[in-house]
């Protein structure tokens, strides 16, 4: 029998489509198991300031389809300090909170791990980030929606590129991770995909653009924002221009449209499954772990392992881009 009676949920780091579906699942699962459920506004910042309120089944009605996060989110410098975390803990005690569910990415889990080591409070995490850059889950909540937003945008860009015989260098999100670039690149039929995990071979890029010229009017290069020594698409466009001054080149930076919008069915189902599993995990005595889906199976991974995902780009997928770019 668990001693947990009151739990709180919050979102932290960059928002991601499906976070609301996750909040809804956590709140309703808590209520289903007769727990009191509280919401914390603006992540760790709201925890430090005590911006905490009770939630019920109605407070999460009609949100499964909404992008963003009803609990809002923030970055909190104070929580990075011992004193800040002590203040946050005091607030949790004030509200009699026994356990937490955090929905966020690597920064949120790093903070959670530190909090547990100092205050021994049970915390389970849900992977909420469009970047898909966490170990211990095949997909993070928000990734599927984001890559579908990217391919919608690139399909439209392709119409212009084709009509004008242009090369478009399209920058997508992912400061440290090329997973949005890679999957949306395959899905949109891009001629090349550049990711921060792998040093870009600009000669190879030039050859590929030249090779595909005879078969196509338009060519699309997808660049993750962290690529080309963080110069992103503009830097890549400069280099291509130097080599091929006669090419008609345009840059399109997709930006934060990738973070917004109604979540896909896949993200809603993922968020719902993981939200239920997170609360059940807490009641089973889990702490310091992220819940994910691996090969369709609910899996718990310690935070410190979940955040060590960097550098895992599947070379077979990059090869697919190469083969199909002819
Ligand atoms: O982690 C999600 C993400 O959208 C990254 O892909 C991107 O690099 C970063 O957040 C942008 O953060 P901000 O909205 O704070 O500029």
Image: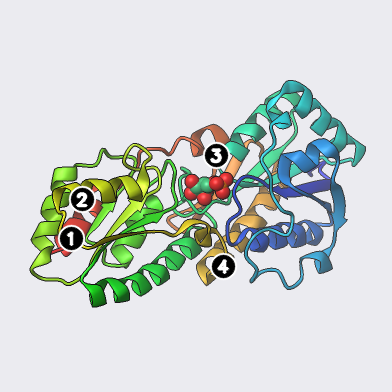
Q: Are marks 2 and 4 in contact (CB under 8 Å)?
A: no
Sequence-earlier tag: 3 or 1: 3
Where is residue 211? Give x, y as percent.
9, 60
* Residue located farthest toward the right when viewing the structure as drawn: 94
Q: For the point 31% across and 56% down, which residue is it?
A: 222
Q: Are marks 2 and 1 in contact (CB under 8 Å)?
A: yes
Q: For the point 41% across and 55% down, which residue is it?
A: 172
Q: Judge from the rendering whether residue 217 lies leftward or rightward of residue 19; answer left or right.
A: left
Q: CA distance from mark 3 to mark 2?
A: 34 Å
Would you name the residue on which mark 3 appears?
106
Q: For the point 32% across and 66% down, which residue is it?
A: 187
Where is residue 11? Give x, y as percent.
68, 49
Judging from the image, what secondary structure is the residue with disc 3 in? helix
Would you name the residue on which mark 2 appears?
240
Sequence-earlier tag: 4 or 3: 3
Q: CA distance from mark 2 to mark 1?
A: 9 Å
Judging from the image, what secondary structure is the residue with disc 2 in? helix
């Amino acid at each position: 029998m668990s001693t947990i009676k009151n739990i709180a949920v919050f979102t932290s780091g960059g928002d991601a489509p499906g976070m609301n579906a996750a909040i809804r699942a956590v709140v309703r699962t808590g209520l289903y198991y007769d727990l009191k459920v509280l919401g914390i506004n603006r992540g760790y910042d709201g925890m430090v300031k005590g911006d905490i309120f009770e939630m019920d089944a109605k407070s999460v009605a009609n949100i499964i389809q909404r992008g963003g996060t009803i609990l809002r989110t923030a970055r909190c410098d104070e929580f990075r300090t011992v004193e800040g975390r002590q203040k946050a803990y005091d607030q949790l005690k004030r509200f009699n909170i026994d356990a937490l569910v955090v929905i966020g990415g690597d920064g949120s889990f790093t903070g959670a791990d530190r909090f547990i080591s100092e205050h021994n409070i049970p915390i389970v995490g849900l992977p909420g980030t469009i970047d898909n850059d966490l170990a211990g889950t095949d997909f993070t909540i928000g990734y599927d929606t984001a890559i579908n937003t990217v391919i919608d945008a690139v399909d439209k860009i392709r119409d212009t590129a084709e009509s004008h015989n242009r090369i478009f260098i399209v920058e997508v999100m992912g400061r440290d991770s090329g997973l949005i670039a890679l999957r949306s690149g395959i899905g949109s039929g891009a001629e090349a995909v550049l990711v921060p995990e792998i040093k870009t071979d600009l000669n190879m890029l030039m050859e590929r653009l030249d090779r595909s010229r005879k078969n196509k009017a338009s060519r699309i290069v997808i660049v993750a924002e962290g690529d080309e020594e963080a110069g992103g698409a503009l830097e890549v466009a400069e280099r291509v221009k130097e080599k091929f001054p006669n090419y008609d080149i345009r840059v399109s930076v997709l930006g934060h449209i990738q973070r917004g919008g109604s979540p896909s069915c896949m993200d809603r189902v993922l968020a719902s499954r993981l939200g239920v599993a997170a609360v059940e995990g807490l009641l089973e005595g889990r702490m310091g772990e992220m819940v994910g889906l691996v090969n369709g199976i609910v899996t718990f991974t310690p935070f410190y392992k979940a955040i060590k995902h960097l550098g895992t780009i599947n070379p077979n997928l990059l090869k697919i881009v190469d083969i199909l770019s002819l």
